[in-house]
Amino acid sequence: MNFITPSPRDEQPESQGPGFRPGGGRRKIAGSVALVFLVLLAAAAGSLAGLMLVYSVDLPQIDQLEHYQPIATTQLYDIHGRIIGSFALERRTPVGYHDFSPVLRQAVISTEDRDFESHWGVNLFRVAAAAWHDVFSKGRAQGASTLTMQLARNLYLTNERTLSRKLQEVFLSLQIEHRFTKRQIFALYGNQIYLGAGVYGFEAGAEYYFSKHASDLTLPEAAMLAGLPKGPVEFSPILNPERALRRRNLVIDAMLEDGRITVAQAQAGRSAPLGLHIEPPPNSVAPWFVEEVRQELDRRFGSEEVHAGGLRVYTTMDLDFQQAANRAVLGGLAAYERSQGWRGHLLNVIAGGYSVEDFRHPDWAQPPTPGAYTHAVITGVLPWQVTARIADRTLILTPADWAWTGFQTADKFLRVGDIVYVQIAGAGNSSGGTLRGTLEEDTGAEGALLAMDNNSGNVLALVGGRDFNLSQFDRATQAERQTGSSFKPYVYTAAVEDGLTPRDTIMDRPVSFGSYVPHNYDGRFLGRISLLKAFADSRNIPALELARHVGMENVIRTARRFGITTDIPPYLPIALGSADVTLEQQVAAYSVFPNDGLRVAPHLIRRVVAADGTPLFEDTPDVTEAISQKTARTMMIFLRSVATEGTAGSLAALHYPLGGKTGTTNNFTDAWFVGFSPSVTCGVWVGYDNRESLGDRETGARAALPIWTGFMKTVIAASPNESFPGTPPVPLPAARQTAALMRFR
């Protein structure tokens, strides 16, 4: 059988009878071509199916995206609902589609994917144009990714430039477009995209760069954010402000070309400055408080959930009180340093082998703001003027700014390269300008403050030291220091429970206990005095006599009931405060007195809520009866006398119900004041980490009490009419009350 088909040229019809069909050969050829085309089409389809099978086998199930929860920032709130800190692996605040302002959505679409509303995930025209550009242009490769493709890549894939990765990106994009609406896709993209500085998503970007929500962005602000995905570092308004400005204006031009804005709007937007209002670094307001919260959350929920789960943590902090605590501690330490005179001994970066231009101080992670204390490096010294640098800002000091040092000219005690401690007086504008300030001194003296609500145990404010950037050690909760006379309330409580009263008398006279020969702070002996007088003046001999009378074991058991857990040996000098105790324990113990004998354990977290609103944890106060109500109210007589006529008698000028006790240790290594109003108990400690002396006569009343007073003025202003249990309220005079409220506001 011969299957050879003759060519049309050789095939000549012999006749034109009824069976003859003109063009039959041509039809056979067309059929063959069609057959070949179908075979090729089938092969292409099979190849495409094979490619899809090969490159989609490892792709994630798109169903997972319906339940996708992006890594979100855990936010911390104070008692008034204000954000005070956050934890995040990626700084992100997920929001819905309508939380992105229309101008932001328009800016993103005009810049990244102008056909977003009409394509089905892959823009073939852009792909072809990009391929043509890449083949025939010697410039940079041109992108062709739609928003959907960018979303697929950011969610599931890497940034490698390979055909297989691109095919996977296309397949995922098609699936995403099939499953989700355009609004859902935009919302996913808007929450996922990286915008530099560790910030992900437009809401977090708006908060970081402009301190506002994405729904409130103006045209220039929206255009700047929309321009960042192309190059978060290259177009960073912080690192490269000029490039960021040019990129922003290109976005505005694209919006004008698309008809989304008018010519007038475009012109106004292009002429506007970047207008940055950088959000302060996370957790900078209360770093020690936030760190304590983080550690507790890690113990309860694990680090991954805390840093990626988007928890909402409602803490016990009052931001107003915390800011007052910050000011009080730093201002009090500065006043202490000045009282000691200029010591010098400055570190010098040049002597350390560094250049002044390259030096960076940890303090500079936070922008300089009026009133802030920070370090600067001196760049120039003239007799009557000093120039210094704080990050990229210039600071000027004049003779009035260092007059307290006793030096008339700067060249007598300062050198180029010295690292100095300053307080910012004026910061010009947020993005530039010369700074003014005053010269201070940082000799290493530290301070700590902790304040809590007497009734609830809420820790309202916590300062663990002078500078968290230099030392994260929390001196409020971790440091065990000798308490000095602030331990005496436990001795007197044991004596009151033994039947003694404030009116009873005791001898203040020279005495020895074996080889131990104690003395009073002032070196004098007053003879027979009342217990009230002995306590108010913090006489040592009466306290030792009382401790011997009731027994040190009993004193220690009493301290245990107040929550003092540190090791306390049963030696008589312990009555004068030679035991090491944390500030946190002292504050919680002292809150027992105004709380009618009840001890409420301090805590920092009120409740925790998951990202979807599910309650995860709610704290309940831990309340125990430390002493009876009768004993507590008797002790209040002692403690209030300190604030009216004793070692803290300066508090009487506040005309407010207050009580507390000073504490000073041998050689003036530790200075304490722990005291309370009817609603708040606060403790302050001042000292050196290496237990160096604070200086001659730097007592609790001199070094710690001013810090306590500065903080408590804010507390008083917040509650101008209070009274202790069993006593009538003592309102502030009308004029003082008005002034206090104005200061608080």
Image (tube, rainbow, N blue to C red):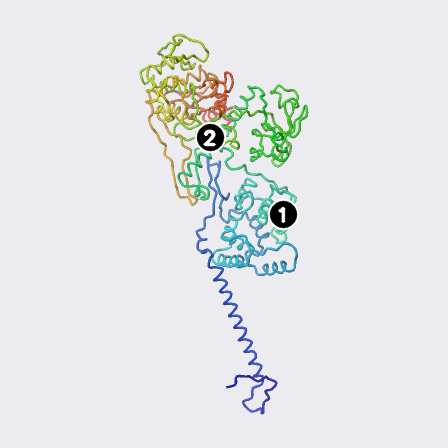
Q: Tag 2 or tag 1, which sits nearer the N-term? A: 1
On screen, 310 above or below 50?
above
Amino acid bearing label 1: Arg
- Is any part of residue 56 visible from this angle? yes
Q: Is mark 1 on a helix, strand or loop?
A: helix
**x then y, percent, for residue 552:** 34, 18
Q: Would residue 105 be found to the left or right of residue 523 on screen?
A: right
C-alpha gap between disc 1 and disc 2? 45 Å
Q: Residue at x 58, y 81 (%)?
A: 26
- Residue 247 is tagged as 1
Judging depth in this view, the residue of 452 and 295 nearest the camera is 295
The residue drawn where x is 53% and y is 70% is 41
Side of 422 where 718 appears, left or right: left
Q: Viewer-proximal residue, 661 or 96?
A: 661
Please name the residue shown 61% across and 60% down the image.
129
> In the image shown, does 210 or 24 lie closer to the viewer?
24
SS type, badge 2: loop
Q: Where is residue 680 in the image (x, y as percent from the top left)?
A: 43, 26
Residue type at mark 2 is Asp
Q: Quadrant of residue 14?
A: bottom right
Q: Would residue 742 be seen by someone viewing this image from the given angle?
A: no
Q: Residue at x 51, y 33 (%)?
A: 285
Residue 144 screen position, x and y as percent: 58, 56
Q: In this orientation, which residue lies closer to the viewer: 331 or 43?
A: 43
Instruction: Estimate the x, y position of residue 322 in percent, counting from the top left.
Output: 48, 30
Check residue 670 in the rendering and tell me which mark sits there, or answer none.
Answer: none
Disc 2 target residue: 474
Foreground mark, 1 or 2, reads: 2
Query: In this rendering, is residue 274 above or below 5?
Result: above
Q: Residues within 10 Å of mark 2 (few under 14, many from 20)?
A: some
Q: Are marks 1 and 2 in contact (CB under 8 Å)?
A: no
Name, please, the residue furthest toward the top.
527
